[in-house]
Image (cartoon, helix red, strand yellow):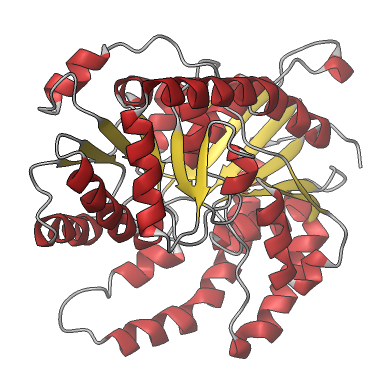
Amino acid sequence: MRIAVFTENSHAGGLDTVIATLIDAWPRNETEGGENDEFVLICNRSHPGLDVIKRRLSRPVKIVAHDAPLHWEWVALFERPGIPGLVRKVISVLSRYPFFLYWLFKAKTLLAGEAADRLLVVNGGYPAGDSCRAAAVAWTWAAPGKPPCVFNFHNLAVAPRAWERWIEGIVDGLVLGGTGVFVAVSKACAASMANRPAIAGSGRVIHIHNGIAEFKPPSARPREIREGLDIPVAAPLCLMLGTYEPRKGHAFLLGAFRRVLKDRPDAFLVICGHGYPGDVKRVRALVDEMGLAENVRLEGFREDVAALIEAADILTVSSQAFESFGLTIVEAMARATPVVATNVGGIPEVIGDDEGGYCLSATDEAGFAARIVSLIKDEGLRKQMGEKGRRRFLERFTAQRMAREYASLVWRET
């Protein structure tokens, strides 16, 4: 069976990990005599994580990297000094649906050219990438007689603004017509589809928790990682893995870490992730403003996640909004590293009842800091929480479990 995976993205991060992991862990297709399915990945060439996906894939996959224009790329052309924000907003509003119409035909061409038997759309959120929604609609034209697509979304579904409800209702209806099932990555993420009544009322929204592969032994040892970051080997080290988007809660985390330093001035915080220059500049300004430059390291996107987690004592997840799962939490659990996180969206589903870490209110800066300090001071507690997290990972969040559940949906004949 030939399976097309269609995605659109503008940030390197967890979505890339999930795509590569899902394809690599895909089970043999028993309905086709135990053969391996073929995969083709269709993605915008401008996606900064595309090369990351290529490097992480261990099985042959055809990559179709297109240069077709995307709405957000068009709007970005007007994000420069001298152009008022209102003008950019008007341009964005007026151009969105013409772009969607364009993508109905472009997606049909891309999909028909690959002659796939099944389509799996992987979207950041909903509505998110309009090319992804267009692909779900165009699939019925590109592959007549084939089963409807499986539409996977990784972030919360957002309600349309009042003025666009009528047209968004039409688009959602079209997407529904080409989709057999919508798969969210958590119960909280699935519940957010209530913001899109046409889809929520269909009874086709389910959830499948993300999974990851067992980490291979890291290429670098904890000592080498720390030396590369100019951090003493014995110093308490907190780690944040995530993009530099404001919703990830850097201000909250830095405020909590400032409290940690009052108790443990020898502690360090490393922040790693993809970030556009403006977002990185904003976080750097916060670090300087809070007087944390000596104890905070700001890094870009790094692929040595296993080594970073192994070098850290605690993983911190400070999301303030729109966190539907929290893949880095599972990555920490796999390495038996305890987690301190906010209880936003689907994060509590991942951590469970203090199984591998703690969930606190996204406004409880003092409590967040106190949990970090308690784990820094108590090696036994760190080990206990790490072991709990490791067990939870093996029970619930393996790549094989995730791939089996997706395969059962994709292989369906109707």
Where residue 287 appears, as percent x and y from the top left, is: 15, 55
Residue appearing at x 32%, y 88% in the figure:
87
Residue 47 in view of the camera: no
The quadrant of the image that shows the N terminus is top right
Relative height, residue 72 to residue 333 (above, below): below
Residue appearing at x 46%, y 28% in the figure:
332
Residue appearing at x 60%, y 90% in the figure:
163
Where residue 10 appears, as percent x and y from the top left, is: 40, 52
Residue 400 in view of the camera: yes
Relative height, residue 35 to residue 264 (above, below): above
> Position of 215 compared to 101: left or right?
left
Q: Nearer the viewer, residue 368 or 65?
A: 368
Where residue 16 appears, as percent x and y from the top left, is: 47, 37
The image quarter in which residue 340 lies: top left
The image quarter in which residue 31 lies: top right
The quadrant of the image that shows the C terminus is top right
Q: Nearer the viewer, residue 265 or 50?
A: 265
